[in-house]
Image (cartoon, helix red, strand yellow):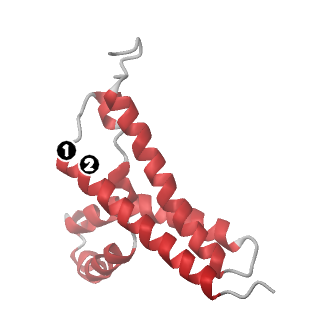
Amino acid sequence: MTSSSGIELGLPYWLAVVGIWIDVAVVAAFTLWISTLSTVTMLPLALGAMFAIAGRALGAVVDYVARGADGQVELAARFGPILDAVRWVLPDLSRLDWRAWPMYGLPADGPSIALSIGMASFYTMVMLGLSVQAFSRREFS
């Protein structure tokens, strides 16, 4: 089903919405973990926003550096290993952006969607586990 604006409704639309919700869940889990550790009121909000921006930009930055950084070999050599380490700590939230399917008719492949959901689910569970552990060690007196 296609709307008058050319946007594909149905499965592509709802899959894009699910991707956005999963993205929000990952950011919320990280923010919850930070809020269990923080004594400053605005720190979880600030770090959550920075986490969301960094997670969304990570994929584009890694692709840019991996493709040679527009001929800047020194830049690629310097930041390539750092980005490889960051990829193990920070989830690539841009992989949950499936808006190209309903907007342009470019379907995402099934394994890519499954791996993205798996990555986000694992990261969310780790953050929630760390939050539970931090709450269990805290004294509320």
Judge from the rendering whether residue 46 lies leftward or rightward of residue 29; answer left or right.
Answer: right
Split into 4 quadrants, where in the image is the N terminus?
Answer: top left
Query: For numbered disc 2, what is the local secondary structure?
Result: helix
Specify the quadrant of the image occupied by residue 82. Answer: bottom left
Q: Amino acid at mark 2?
A: Ile
* Dot 1 crowding, Cα within 10 Å, few <14, some 14–19, many 20+: few
Judge from the rendering whether residue 137 lies leftward or rightward of residue 130; answer left or right.
Answer: right
Q: Amino acid at mark 1?
A: Gly
The residue identified by callout 1 is 110
Q: How far across and down, in percent of the image, does residue 29 sit?
A: 53, 65
Using the image as rendered, state which of residue 139 and residue 43 is in the foreground.
139
Judge from the rendering whether residue 118 lies leftward or rightward of residue 140; answer left or right.
Answer: left
Q: Residue at x 39, y 33 (%)?
A: 14
6 shown above or below 23: above
Q: How far across and down, in percent of the image, does residue 100 sit?
A: 32, 36
* Dot 2 crowding, Cα within 10 Å, few <14, some 14–19, many 20+: some
Q: How far across and down, in percent of the image, does residue 42 sit?
A: 73, 70
For the question of whether residue 125 can be seen, the reply is yes
Query: For numbered disc 1, what is the local secondary structure?
Result: helix
Q: Residue at x 40, y 71 (%)?
A: 90
Using the image as rendered, state which of residue 67 and residue 116 is in the foreground.
116
52 shown above or below 130: above
